[in-house]
Image: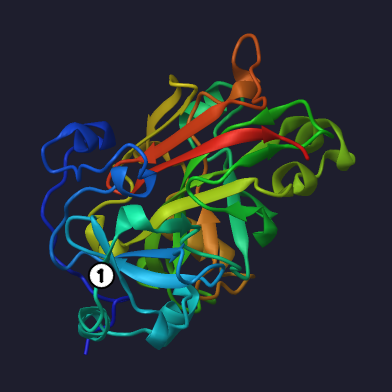
Amino acid sequence: MTTIVGAALRTRGASSRLSTILASSSTIRCPPTSPSCRFFSKSSSKAMRFVQYRTGATGARQLLGVLSEDGSKVSDISERYGGDLITLIRAEPSYEEVKATASKVTPVAIGDVELVAPVTNPQKILCVGLNYSGHCEEQNKPIPKEPMFFSKYATTIVGPYDDVIAHRISDQIDWEVELAVIIGKKAKSVSKANAMEHVFGYTVAQDISARDWQKQRNGGQFLIGKSMDTFCPLGPAVVHKSLVADPHALSIKCSVNGVEKQNGSTGELIFRIDDIIQRVTESITLLPGDVILTGTPAGVGMHRKPAEFLKPGDVIDSEIEKIGKIKNKVVADA
């Protein structure tokens, strides 16, 4: 039986830009007070989109759900998979198994739940720097011959509509919208030809960065500048790879306070997903649920003229075609 990780499920076409999806008649209409619903669009019956969430009835307990075809409802599959997407990924269930589990419960409206990050506590968050041609150009840097890898801690992860803290130790906090890859099975010494077999799905990420700590402090090491609490919003869902025919042909953009800052395409990736996985697994084992942030297009605050940085009260909208949209407010450090 074919597993979800390995399935090549057929899907209907989607519009060329996420903004068109949101404006089209296929968009699910929700009350303005229900942000959890606004950013999902219709897809084929075999498209699997997974969310982690909470409800008033469950309190702090996290649930795992599958979205309905139209994105308006979520079915709880937590009893079988422990309320955790990584548990499901490790189990490598078939599509039929997940569908059967979801069919046994009464779905709830997406507007009645609180979405949290669709992946929590991955073993690794691996990031690729300088991986868009435009991002290199805006810094007057040559196209790298090898990828530049760095990491973020899992404690950076917050949900798709959660706040980002403007930590008081930095006054150079910046935005970076990124396509995040979720690993579907253990990968060690994987060939480029087989690399995509190890991908489970995709989600939207913000690689929030404290540029002063990334560039000028901590000995030039990225870790603190990239790993401050709340510096990795993820969501709204993990979209199974079967729904994304070509992850290297998606529009990707970011706006701050309604003003567009980044507008690119994943086609600009210098090192593509299969290449990244091949290179990493030559020396590092990737595990189910690990997250790879693939890089950001041009338009980050640090390289604008004059430079722009986030401040409390700012609102960041990050979106990727066919994947979804997240919205995060910047708040003052407590």
Q: Residue at x 69, y 30 (%)?
A: 173
Q: Position of residue 182 (x, y in %)?
A: 45, 63
Q: Could you tell whether 52 is left or right of 26 in the image?
A: right
Give the image location of residue 106, x and y in percent. Answer: 24, 75
Q: Is residue 213 visible?
A: yes
User: Count the marks: how many?
Assistant: 1
- Taking the image as shown, residue 161 lies to the left or right of residue 79, namely right
Image: 35 above or below 235 = above
Q: Residues within 10 Å of mark 1 (few under 14, many from 20)?
A: some
Residue 222 position in % (x across, y down)? 75, 44
Report the residue at 48% width, 36% height from top: 132
Q: Against 118, is 156 above or below?
A: above
Residue in front for this viewpoint, 113 or 213: 113
Q: Is residue 125 left or right of residue 225?
A: left
- The residue type indicated by label 1 comes to Pro
**What residue does disc 1 label?**
107
Instruction: Tell me the quadrant of the picture where the C terminus can be found.
Output: top right
Q: Quadrant of residue 196?
A: bottom left
Task: Give how far across and how far down residue 129 sits, in percent.
Answer: 60, 42
269 and 64: which one is in front? 64
Q: Quadrant of the N terminus?
A: bottom left
Q: Is residue 146 visible?
A: no
155 sits left or right of 32 in the view: right
Q: Quadrant of residue 254?
A: top left
- Name the outermost residue toward the bottom: 1
Figure coloring: rainbow
Q: Residue furthest front?
A: 57
**Mark 1: secondary structure:** loop
Instruction: Please report the residue visible at 26 percent of the width from the left and 55 percent of the height from the top.
Output: 244
**Does residue 48 lie above or below 213 as drawn?**
below
